[in-house]
Image: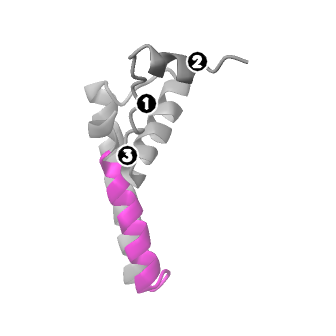
Amino acid sequence: MIHLADRRHRRGVRATPAPDPAPTTPAFEAALTIQAMYQASGQSLNDPATAAAYRTALEATVLLVNGAHAHSVIDDDGWKHLRAMLSDMAQAPDLV
């Protein structure tokens, strides 16, 4: 068996290591998922009108979560977690 790595080394050719994958964040992962959902229906968050409609729907969702918290439907921890997730989701049009 001939090891190509050894052969390259002997010939003075250095193998360039593969770059580390781009760091990912929950916001970026959410953006990819949301964009895929829109693309499945023939739309895209890259379209300004679609992005505007998405932001409006998200604002309504934030209003719903805030109302649920105000009426003690969800506790403080649940509210904080949901708001953090919605904050990540709000970045989707800017990340795709």
For this orientation, the residue located farthest to the top is: 11
Q: Residue at x 38, y 45 (%)?
A: 28
Range of the magenta residues?
Answer: 72-91
Vertical side of 72 occupied by 43: above or below: above
Q: In terms of secondary structure, where does tag 3 sit? A: loop
Which amino acid lies under the numbered mark 1 shown in the image of this protein?
A: Ala
Q: Earlier in the sequence, mark 2 or mark 3?
A: 2
Closer to us: 29 or 10: 10
Question: Mark 3 highlights which residue?
Answer: 23
- The amino acid marked with disc number 2 is Leu
Separation (CA) of disc 1 from disc 2:
17 Å
Question: Callout 1 environment at 10 Å: few (<14), some (14 to 19), or many (20+)?
Answer: few
Q: Secondary structure at mark 1?
A: loop
| 45 relative to 55, above or below | above
Tell me the residue that label 2 is attached to: 4
Residue 72 horizontal/vertical position (percent): 45, 86
Is there CB contact under 8 Å for labels 1 and 2? no
The answer for how far apart the CA atoms under marks 1 and 3 are is 14 Å
Q: Which one is closest to the eye, mark 1 or mark 2?
A: 2
CA separation in Å, label 2 and label 3:
31 Å
Residue 6 rendering spot, x and y as whole percentages: 55, 23
Mark 1 or mark 3: name the one nearer the start of the chain: 1
87 in the magenta segment: yes
Quadrant (top left/top right/bottom left/bottom right) for the C terminus: top left
Which residue was labeled with disc 1?
A: 18
